[in-house]
Amino acid sequence: MIGFSWFDTIELCVTHAVRVVAKAVESGAGRVSATDEQTEEFVEKMRKKVRSTVFASPRCAGSNTYYINAQGDSPYLRPTSRVESILSLRKALKDGYEYSA
């Protein structure tokens, strides 16, 4: 399960966004797109991990809360530790985006 707070999550995401923009500027790119392959890989990995959490338990089935939407997905829950998240963001920065003019 997540090993850090909402504020840590925001900090990680903003830092990552700044790094992506900096890389775009450095390379002269005017456009950045997440690759379909990396996005799908990340989403599937998160969905698989969340299946082993309380949010995927039968007691939460049919819930429509902050954590679980009407489709049973938990889009705001990152079921990883801070270290796993940092490593994932590093991987994404390396080969998760396409930079173009």
Image: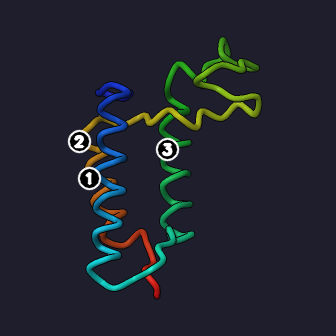
Which residue sits at x=29%, y=44%? Answer: 84
Gap between marks 3 and 2, in whole Å? 15 Å
Q: Is residue 56 left or right of residue 27?
A: right
Identify the secondary structure beneath mark 2: helix
- The residue that disc 1 covers is 87
Local secondary structure at mark 3: helix
Identify which residue is drawn at 72% across, 20% down. Answer: 64
Mark before the other along the chain sequence, 1 or 3:
3
Q: How is the image coloured?
A: rainbow
Question: Is the residue under label 2 in contact with that under label 1 (CB below 8 Å)?
Answer: yes
* Viewer-closest of 6 and 55: 6
Rendered view: 69 above or below 13: above
| Quarter location, residue 66 | top right
| Numbered badge on residue 46 | 3
Q: Viewed as shown, does residue 5 lie left or right of 55?
A: left
Q: Are marks 1 and 3 in contact (CB under 8 Å)?
A: no
Residue that badge 2 annotates: 83
- In the rendered image, which quarter is residue 23 located in? bottom left
